[in-house]
Amino acid sequence: MHWLFLAGICAVVNPPAVESGPSVLLEIHSGPKRQTTLKPTRYHPQPGDIVLFDDHSTFTTKVYHCCGTGRPLHAGVVFRRADGSNAILEAGTNAVMKVFIFDLEPRLQKFDGTILIRRPRKAMNPEQCAKLADFAAAQEGKPYAIARLLLQLTPFRPRSHVVMTQVFGRTVLDRERWICSELVIASLAAADVWSVDEFPANAMYPRDICYDERFDLRPYYDTPALWYPRAELSSHGNGVRVGRSISGPD
C-alpha cells in the first residue's frame, strides 16, 4: 500500500463526486496555501494514452537518481486491438526483461502503487490507431535493452548532457530491444502522433514523459492526471490512498 502526497503538498480529498462505477482520472489543480484539489472525471481509455507507473521502490528510485532522473519509474502506452478491446504496451514490466502486451483494465487494477495518465490533446484517427496497434503487436516478446539500460549509469548516456542528447539522442522504430520509455516515444512516432525527429526516445525516461521539464509534450498531451479505481477516494491524513489493497473509503 502507498499513500500519495502529490509532490510533497497536501491534497484536499473531498472533490465533487462522480457516479460510482468505472475508474476515474483525478485532474490535479493547485490552489492557494499550497493546497491541491482533485477533480474526478470518468476514465474512458483511448489509443495513445500514456500510462506512468510508480511502485515507490526505494532501490529503483536510487538507480534513477544515479541516471539523473526520478519518479515515476515505468511507462506504457494504450492501444486498441482489432476486436475493440483496450490494451497496453510495456517493456520490462515487474523487472521481467521483455516487451509485454496486457489487457488494460486488469493491469491498472492490479498495480500496487501510483498511476498517472497523460491523454492526447487530439484523438488519434483510425489510421493512426491502426498503425499504433500494428507497431505494438510487432514488438511483443522482444527482449529488454539491458545493455542500453546499463549505459544509463555512465557519463556516456545520451541524456547526460545537452550536447550528448543533440549528438546521440534519436528515435529508432525498428529496434530489436527496448527500454520502457523509449518504446512509448517510438510507438507514438510510429503512429504519426509526432515525427521520429521530434523527441529523442533513447534520451528520455518516464519522468521526461510525465513532466515537461526537459522535453515539452504539452502541444500533444494534457498534463498528467491521477488514475483511481473508483470515484470515492480513500484518504490517509491529508493524503490520497492508492494501491492494490484499496477496498473502500476509510
Image (cartoon, grey):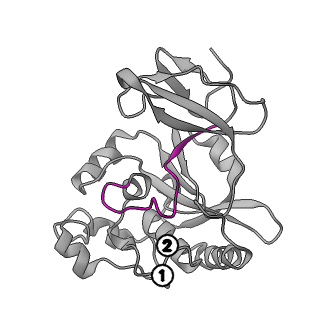
Q: Which residue is mark 1?
A: 176
Q: Position of residue 148 (x, y in %)?
A: 33, 72
Q: Secondary structure at mark 2?
A: loop
Which residue shows up at 47% across the image and 80% down it? 195
Amino acid on which disc 2 is placed? Pro
Mark 2 Cα within 10 Å, few/some/many (few <14, many 20+)?
Answer: some
Furthest toward the front, the residue is 32
Please check the rendered image and state whether residue 204 is part of the magenta-colored stretch, yes or no. Answer: no
Label annotation for residue 143: 2
Q: Magenta residues, as a range?
A: 212-228
Looking at the image, is mark 1 or mark 2 earlier in the sequence?
A: 2
Q: Position of residue 8 (x, y in %)?
A: 35, 29
- Residue 124 occupies quadrant: bottom right
Is residue 239 visible to the viewer in this orientation of the structure? yes
Q: Is there CB contact under 8 Å for labels 1 and 2? A: yes
Label annotation for residue 240: none
Is the magenta region chiefly helix, strand or loop?
A: loop
Q: Position of residue 54 (x, y in %)?
A: 46, 44
Q: How many numbered markers are drawn?
A: 2
Alpha-carbon span between mark 1 and mark 2: 7 Å
Which residue shows up at 44% across the image and 63% down it? 181
Amino acid on which disc 1 is placed? Glu
Which residue shows up at 77% across the image and 29% down it? 20
Q: Which mark is nearer the camera, 1 or 2?
A: 1
